[in-house]
Amino acid sequence: MISFEKFTLANGLQVIVHEDPATTMAVVDVIYNVGSRDEDENLTGFAHLFEHLMFGGSENIPSFDTPLQKVGGENNAFTTPDLTNYYISVPAQNIETAFWLESDRMKQLAFNTQSLETQRKVVIEEFKQRYLNQPYGDVWLKFRPMIYQKHPYRWPTIGAGIQHIEEAQMSDVRAFFEKHYIPSNAVLVVAGRVKVDQVKALAEKWFAPIDAGIKPNRKLPQEPEQSEDRRMEISGDVPANRIYKAYPVIGRYEPEYYAIDLMSDLVGRGESSYLYEHLVQKQRIFDSIGTYQTSSIDPGLLIIQGQVSDDVKIEEAEKALEKALQDFAASPIIEKDLQMVKNQSEASLVFGEVEVLNRAMNLAMAANAGDVNLVNEESEKIAKVQVADLEKCAQRLFIQGKSNTLLYKKTAK
């Protein structure tokens, strides 16, 4: 259990406090309720661009890192399709520096041509390195638009194409900031060696004067139920053939999420999983194979990814994979196997709460999803999952459901 207290400033900023006197550190974690799903389809990659721009200087602070380093702090950020997260860790006695830094860039970034051009180049280079010049890097640039045909999950966080960042105008950038990076669209978590009254005073001092703004009214197009199997083949200069399969599933905070997650673990998590045992160890059809969920807030995906052995044709590997999934779904699940993956999930939860930074992030993400107490309900929800729940999920996905398949073929030399 993660203890917390929460309050909301007059400008709409949600504030959550987690006291931990056992540490000498303090964490300030700010989540903005904006991700790549909130972008215009013709201006994609902006949420990720802002992950970089937010470190480019603000109204009163030309260099974000310099004052933080002087007080022994460190910071970072990440962007997902659903949110953008900025976090700072500092010695607890220097926590006000973190409040100053985060509030100043929330109030007003330093919108200037130099900062935009610098970060534009950084993002373009990242796009090229990770998505264009890396083996299999273009998978999700091509696969997502086939899977999602309406919902903005159809482009990756980096953006649908490099041209959107190349052509980004200052007016577009400023409008995106003013719409999303406001107190009423954010969650502030303060954790570590802090006191609730101390945090209240600092929040009022540094964040309360910022205008609330108008909280965006998110109206995203909903993805229709998939009614047919979809597939595509691509080829490239890659070391081996790979197969990707994607099955539409529910969102991260829906009740059945944990049953699907545990079933996914039995299918393809680690060397004790069904697919690894049958397709890697026994039949030697794949060199590696695994499953995971995208765990998005809106309906997401169960992904299966396998690297085909060199002496096996990719078409044969696909047939073997499909048969293994059908066999798994048609076979009864043993109680002790369910308990094994439950234990693994519980251990992951416990391990994830060791670091105060992780606790702060978990609180922030739950609050961003609508209920901060969700963070303390996961263990109970996992414990309630029954064998019948997993069997139902497997049959609905692998036998009755529709899949998306991408064959990534190694170019012949």
Image: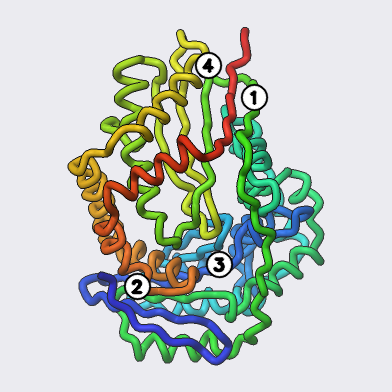
Image check: 166 left or right of 21? Answer: right
SS type, badge 3: loop
Image check: 265 left or right of 306? Answer: left
Q: Is any part of residue 128 visible from this angle?
A: yes
- The CA span between labels 3 and 2 is 18 Å
SS type, badge 2: strand
Q: Mark 4 or 1 closer to N-term?
A: 1
Q: Mark 3 or 1 closer to N-term?
A: 3
Of the numbered discs in the image, which one, if any, rests on residue 26?
2
Residue drawn at the location 32% of the way across and 62% of the way down: 378
Q: Which residue bears the numbered disc 3?
A: 64
Q: Mark 4 or 3 closer to N-term?
A: 3
Tell me: residue 76, above or below residue 405. Answer: below
Q: Mark 3 or 2 closer to N-term?
A: 2
Q: Which residue bears the numbered disc 4?
A: 314
Residue drawn at the location 60% of the way across and 76% of the way down: 106
Q: Amino acid at mark 2?
A: Ala
Q: Amino acid at mark 1?
A: Glu
Image check: 106 left or right of 274? Answer: right
- The CA span between labels 2 and 4 is 51 Å
**Number of marks in the image?**
4
Q: Amino acid at mark 4?
A: Ile
Q: Mark 1 or 2 closer to N-term?
A: 2
